[in-house]
Amino acid sequence: MTIPGWVDLQVNGQIGVDFSSATLTADDFMRAAEAVLNSGTAVFLPTVITSSMELYRRNLPLIAETIEKHGLTGQIPGIHLEGPFLNQAPGYSGCHNPEWMLPPENGMFDELFDLCRGRLKLITVAASARKLIPYIKSRGVTVSIGHCPAEPEELAHAAEAGAELFTHLGNGVPNQLPRHKNVIFNALAEDRLKAMIITDGFHLPPEVIKCFIRCKGADNIIVISDGSPAAGLPPGRYNVLGNDAILEPEGKLHNPVKQCLVGSAFTMKRCMDYLRDLELLTEDELITVGYRNPLAVIGIKK
């Protein structure tokens, strides 16, 4: 099967453009979008992380209207909101600002949905937001769980409510977890949740990727880049998604104070090439995890 390119459900920015920046302009967005679409990615969701309501009110309509104005709804079918209904606990908040996280509430979701001009395709929420999940689903938005601790029962309730995914499994968690009872194993054991994983060579070690794939199977894996505003930039120090981050020469992007990664400095092509080199999947399975599955979960048939 020949595909036009990969599908990336989480792109936070590119070539110095941050989709969660208070200075984002339509021209900036277009420059970043063109860079993504010229990198081997055929379809992507611009992602806005946990932000202030002021930022949401500014950036979400700007992004939605720019997509429509330039006729890009085929290549950029909608927006991914990673937050604000996440968990504030240290480690689980990752590079997100916990002060901007909000309790799950229908009216707040409605405002975010309306700000996206009906183009909200995917939202990442904590498992504790399970009472909000059916309402989100009723608006035609796919729900992913992430940035939270979650017992098996919580994940089961979230899946029963309509959650379909787990955002960047293995990341957005504390650096140290209980060895057996932890959210990673719990998410792997919940068969109704597909796992989104970042295969840039830094977010997950090869043996962890292998275990995730063996546990979930290619039909339940979705590769994302988690591409950051530093993607496409040379090594150096950058303010990335509200973090003072270092982009190392080998490509690792991290906040040394928080001791966490700050998204990826690579595109989907790099992620898929890295995964191919691990020789864990056939070429058809690579197309499944990098093209078919992501399109299917956001309701696009190609």
Image: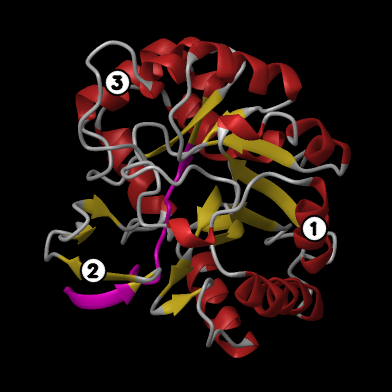
Secondary structure, mark 2, is: strand
Check residue 235 for magenta coloring: yes
Expressed as whole percent of the image width and height from the top left, the position of residue 222 reads 51, 34
Picture disc at residue 113: 1
Q: Is residue 278 above or below residue 266?
A: above
Main SS, magenta region, reads loop
N-terminal of the pair, mark 3 or mark 1, is 1
Along the line of sight, the residue nearer the viewer: 296 or 84: 84
Q: What residue sits 77% from the left and 43% below the top?
A: 141
Is residue 43 something that shows in the picture? Answer: no
Q: Secondary structure at mark 1?
A: helix
Q: Residue at x 68, y 74 (%)?
A: 63
For the residues labelled 3 and 2, the Cα–Cα distance comes to: 29 Å
- Residue 147 coordinates in the image, percent (x, y): 45, 40
Is residue 93 visible in this depiction of the protein?
Answer: yes
- 10 Å crowding of disc 3: few (<14), some (14-19), many (20+): some
Q: Nearer the viewer, residue 59 or 86?
A: 86
* Residue type at numbered disc 2: Ala
The quadrant of the rendering that contains the N terminus is: top right
- Residue assigned mark 2: 245
- The reply to whether the C-beta atoms of the residues labelled 3 and 1 are less than 8 Å apart is no
Foreground residue among 289 and 66: 66
In the image, the segment drawn in magenta is 223-239
Residue lying at the far right of the rendered structure: 138
In this rendering, would 268 be left or right of 3? left
Q: Which residue is mark 3?
A: 210
- Whether residue 300 is in magenta: the answer is no
